[in-house]
Amino acid sequence: MDFLEREKRDEDAGEPDGRFYNLKEVVPPCSREESLLFFSCVFGNDKPIVVEIGSGNGHFLVDYAERHPGSNYIGTEILTGRARKFSSKLKKRNVKNIIIFWGDTRRFVWDFLYEDSVEEFIVMFPDPWPKIRHHKHRLLSNEFIRMLYVRLKAGGKISVATDYEEYRDFIIREFGKVKGLRNLFSNGYSVYPEDYPKTIFEDRFRKEGKLIYYMQWVKEEDAAGFVAQGSSHRVRRRNM
């Protein structure tokens, strides 16, 4: 079952929304062209694609998409309850420029996005996994950042916010290992942008007196050799 057949079936079956996709059931696109065609059909246009990693209940992305209608937005969330609340929020506010992928974010990025296709990745308050023995679970590792890099367009951005100082420094170090990504702040981070929507975590952390650290990287001119290497790795994985 391909993407478009899945969307039609969900609408007929009364699932949360025709823009709600279960990663365990959807067949990934087989090429960059198929991926771009799907998103073009779903959104009804070819506007730039912005992906939020770990959207929760959708508080940030829904507000952000309404303020910036010039792009198409993809939210990802692994927790069932949050993903369904996110879907309900889209319906209530009649937001048409967002779709939701429910499942493992890493799988979504790896299987559903292709090179040079995303305008921006947004990661708001990822779990810092503060205990040293749990650091292996941190989302923003060097390996995952490289996955994002390959899928970014030249000039595309990765925006990250955290309240956890040690994780902030860890993130900056991991991004620093990826050639072709430039940090936009001289000291590595800045304050949370005033024009950004509030999030549940951001509001909670401020009430607790915590500082919010905002970081942003831009993809410079493509390192063609690295992009090709990333693409061929995808092909080998699919043929295993």
Image: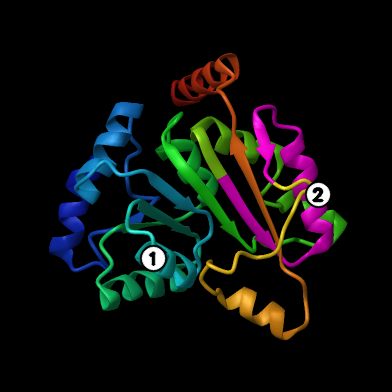
Instruction: Name, please, the residue furthest toward the top.
Output: 225
The residue labelled by disc 2 is 187
Q: Give the range drawn in magenta.
A: 158-184
The magenta stretch spans residue 182:
yes
The residue labelled by disc 1 is 67
Query: How far is mark 2 from mark 1, CA to CA?
Result: 29 Å
Identified by mark 2, the residue type is Asn
Left or right of 27? Residue 44 is left
Q: Is mark 1 on a helix, strand or loop?
A: helix
**Identity of the residue drawn at 49% across and 37% down:** 110
Left or right of 30? Residue 143 is right
Q: Which of 69 and 37 is in front in this view?
A: 69
Disc 2 or 1, which lies upstream in sequence?
1
Give the crowd class for mark 2: few <14, some 14-19, many >=20 residues within 10 Å.
Answer: few
Establish if 179 lies above or below 162. above
Left or right of 37? Residue 122 is right
Q: Which of 159 and 171 is in front in this view?
A: 159
The magenta stretch spans residue 230:
no
Classify the position of the N terminus by image quarter.
top left
